[in-house]
Image (cartoon, rainbow, N blue to C red):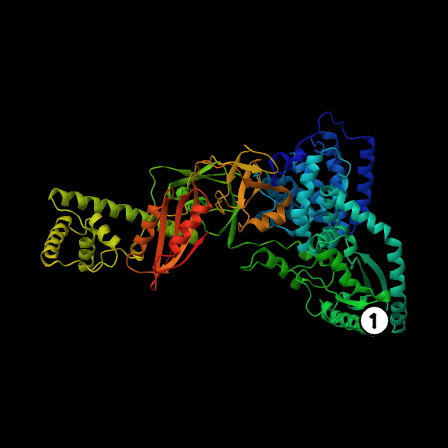
Amino acid sequence: MKKLYLCKEFTEYIQRPMENELPYTDTEITQIWDLFEKLLQILEPHLKEGDEEKLRAHIKMSLESGVIPRDVFGLNPILMSLETAFIAIEEEGLKRDGVCAILLYSSVFHGLTTLEQIKKEYGETVCTILHGLVRIQELYTKNPVIESENFRNLLLSFAEDMRVILIMIADRVNMMRQIRDTEQVEAKMQVSQEANYLYAPLAHKLGLYKLKSELEDLSLKYLEHDAYYMIKDKLNATKRSRDIYIEKFIAPIDEKLKEAGLKFHMKGRTKSIHSIWQKMKKQKCGFEGIFDLFAIRIILDSDESLQHTDLKKLRMKEHAQCWQVFAIITNMYQSNPKRLRDWLTVPKSNGYESLHITVLGPENKWVEVQIRTERMDDVAERGLAAHWRYKGVKSSEGGMDEWLNSIRSALEAGDGNAVMDEFKMDLYEDEVFVFTPKGDLIKFPKGATVLDFAYHIHSKVGNACTGARINNKIVTFRHQLQSGDQVEILTSSNQKPRQEWLRIVKTSRAKSKIRLALKETQVKEALFAKEMLERRLKNRKVELEESVMNHLIKKMGFKETRDFYKQIADGTLDATEVIDKYVELQQQGKGNSVTPNNPTQKAEEFVFENPNEEIVEHNDDVLIIDKNLTGVDFQLAKCCHPIYGDRVFGFTTINGGIKIHRCDCPNAPELRRRYGYRIVKAQWSGKGNSQYSTTLHIIGNDDIGIVNNITSIISKEEKIMMRSINIDSHDGLFSGNLIINVEDTSRLQSLIKKLRAIKGVKQVTRI
């Protein structure tokens, strides 16, 4: 199965009429006008003068123009917009501005009208909502991966107005309801996966539990048909016995609550099919193993006299009533204190308030009881839409989740819809989200530049970066990134990192890679300087001895060898003077049989190329994929670098190829959890002459000669090649990574054993 992308061809489904599709039918046109009249009746108190006539003329123009085609499912967009408007009104509490935006969107998208005309005729707010919807539609054309949390956050930050997100959720719920019998199976799967990964989590964050459950159930129904209907059939089969038990359980509670003078109503609520399926998978059990299939909900009448005046007094009274009900029930049935959930004292971040208890009912069955008021139930079912009195709340450093969480504290009593008109999302002041050419979404701190992006891709790309093409416009590498940018890096083989680049980049990742590149440049310059000294010494018929040179370097006051050679390279040190001192020191050593104190380098002086760069390998070994497939195109995963002899598995990529991972790969658990259907069996079979790259992490005492001992052992090993080494020294200890090419695990284990036997080596591990 392919990775889920919001591909351009799919996300612009509104623009794709079905072939040979008939125009709108008379039945559809009748439905459109019937729904429009009903909508006007509901919205009448909220409409402005002239709205009705303008909307009526707009719908008539849309029907007659023939510009707005059916979507990929053959659905009528105008009829769909009216149905979406009803969901937005009834389930989310949208009023005039949100509904107008829903009805006008298709016309704006297909060029029948412009945002400027909308602003003139319907006002600034409707125009802002439509602008947010259009911007989000433009995001889809960049092929983002929708499982990405970054995409969800970018989508929210692009919305500008909270109603944009609510409209998108309502539209997706309506579409999921309509596509049950469609023949467009692939598009149906795309819509369902998008609903599950993107819209259901958004609905959950906003407390829209009813819509969230519907999206999850419908996506399960379309994506995992057998599981959905298995659970549904079993729920239907046990419904009668469940209803009888609920009546038996609530009868005595009903009597006691009425005796206490409380006004209330009770109902039994069955867990959603999606929730049951998730619990079955989590607990690894069948349907019969799920015991909390339903809960009893006791809903107390709210005090209407306080509802629009004093929220604090209202809550105090409601809490007292809920705890009174708690006391009555726990006196009747034994409670489980471990299952008490008090969301009255500390409500959930999205505004959810309720008191949950689990008691032992008749027939020794545990039953969950939820106690809340009508106001609390309204918030629980319809989320933040239950109270449209928002304050402008900016996000903190925590990002979108904390911003959404902070909304709860801004809720106040009443229907202050006018306040919503002033509400604008002011999000991610410190973050920007940009796209790669392939549609991957990357998060950067605000102020990050093209150079940050280049180094995020790869150090080689960063080192050679000269600029970028952003949204088809050429910019320099100093250009600051903006959310929604699609960035293509431009490089040149003549480009080299410079010290000033450290002041251009914003991310620590880029800075560390620039420092490493500058360090490598210094190493190359040092090697050049060393070669130059060797040539000049050779011209004087003097042989270069490392021990003598190291002694000279120390004698001249240099702590680091590279600093010595760097000063020779840039001309700070006179090479002729250095050679004279070297010859003098060498003559003294020969005359007195004196050897320098430091004949061998310590680990802190050892500098090589970066081991994280990519290494291209030849591979002619044989893997058996799945049961008996050989000769299948595969690649070795770079996250775990498997080699011949490792226990491995295959993972089907979006391009249809197979990536081979080690079974103990750090990414393996997440791959199995999220993409178990893309895992295939794999095992090594025939052995060729392949060399595999793998990395060893070594820790030990920073003793003189330790590095030489390590490299000496590797060089003596047959068919093992050392590609790079990077070692750092601190407080008498060294740690570093070796990248080697090796044939199989047996040779690797043999090498590791020998390295561990070196005096001073404390630990050798494969990473």
Check disc 1: other Cα within 10 Å, few if <14, some if 14-19, many if 20+: some
Q: Position of residue 757 (x, y in %)?
A: 37, 57
Q: How many marks can you see?
A: 1
Q: Looking at the image, can residue 253 be seen?
A: yes
**Camera-side residue of 561 and 645:** 645
**Camera-side residue of 450 and 766:** 766
Q: Position of residue 737 (x, y in %)?
A: 39, 52
Which three-letter amino acid code belongs to the residue tagged 1?
A: Tyr
**Vertical side of 341 occupied by 462: above or below:** above
326 sits to left or right of 171? right
Find numbered disc 1 in the image and state the secondary structure of the residue it sits on: loop
226 sits to left or right of 682? right
**Vertical side of 253 occupied by 714: above or below:** above
Identified at 25% across, 48% down, the residue is 526
Name the residue tied to disc 1: 333
**Camera-side residue of 179 and 243:** 243
Q: Looking at the image, can residue 506 be seen?
A: no
Q: Where is residue 386 in the image (x, y as percent from the top left)?
A: 74, 58
The quadrant in which the N terminus is found is top right
Identified at 52% across, 55% down, the residue is 429
Q: Position of residue 173 (x, y in %)?
A: 73, 45
**Vertical side of 159 occupied by 185: above or below:** above
Using the rendered view, name the quadrant where residue 63 is placed.
top right
Using the rendered view, name the quadrant where residue 105 is placed.
top right
Using the rendered view, name the quadrant where residue 597 is placed.
bottom left
**Camera-side residue of 106 and 519:** 519
